[in-house]
Image (spheres, rainbow, N blue to C red):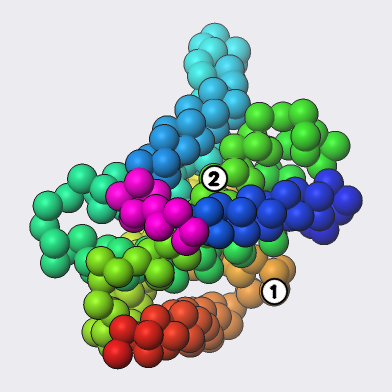
Amino acid sequence: MFSVQHIIWLIISIILIAVSVIYCRKKNVSLKQVLNVACAICVFSELTKVFGTIRMVSSQDGSIIRPYIPMNHLPLHLCSLQIILIFYVRFAENKKMRERILAFMYPSCIIGAIAALLMPSIFTTSISVNEAFTHPISYQFFIFHTMLIVLGINIGFSKEIKWEVKHIYSAILIAVLLGFISIYINSMLASPTYLNGELLYVDFWPNFMFTFDDPIGLNITTIEQWYLYLVVLILVVCVLVTLFFLPVIKRSK
């Protein structure tokens, strides 16, 4: 994190964000047009990620070899879930539901993508820092998250939504609900070892929505610490979402 390659990518991302937002504002680009571009980038992103990370893996005895995508690349992170939401709000006809989803996407696209750009997991799970400009996954990662920030900013500037206090509550509710569901998913995709029906240990578990472990390396070892971590995580989400909505609600009024 914050290696020379990482810093260069951050500078590139900031320039792309600034140029894209200024262009959209100057040319009065509609939200529909922004979503069209976002849909295209989503398709490019997932195709690149799938075919850039899939590899042939053998069974323990070597008798079977099949393609496999590591679990951390499944589209279950907050930023990856935005792909489904992007296509939904682009083509949905239910205006009320579309408005709720856009209200959730506005802060979550920006916050989630900024966190991902500052803490790029690809350099610890997929590629080395030395491959930052030679591996397609690096381009996929930074371009996709840059797009999410541009999309989130354009949603905030969009005149399609009359921002109200209720949008704060709905956005927080969706975020908490996704976090709760991720607890099930993280447990389902873990690799536990049982002996005579008794759980001995877990070799691996994912961390979708960061509900099992924090992204900054805190040493959570007891259930009480984990409960406290969840409370802090929810409070952080509430504060950040509220801060993001205050200026757009004020502007609407």
- Is 124 magenta? The answer is no
Residue 177: in sight, yes or no?
Answer: no
Number of disc labels: 2
Residue 132 position in % (x across, y down): 77, 38
At 27% from the left and 84% from the top, the residue drawn is: 164
In the foreground, 175 or 6 = 6
Residue 51 position in % (x across, y down): 54, 23
First along the sequence among labels 1 and 2: 2
Q: Could you tell me which secondary element the residue under label 2 belongs to? A: helix
For residue 242, which quarter of the picture?
Answer: bottom left
Q: Mark 1 highlights which residue?
A: 218
Q: Could you tell me which secondary element the residue under label 1 belongs to? A: loop
Q: Mark 2 highlights which residue?
A: 144
Check disc 1 and give the amino acid type. Answer: Leu
Q: Which mark is residue 136?
A: none
Quarter in which the C terminus is drawn: bottom left
At 13% from the left and 62% from the top, the residue drawn is: 95
Magenta segment boundaries in residue numbering: 25-35
- Is there CB contact under 8 Å for labels 1 and 2? no
Residue 231 position in % (x across, y down): 48, 85
Instruction: Give the answer, above or below, for where 218 lies relative to 210.
Output: below
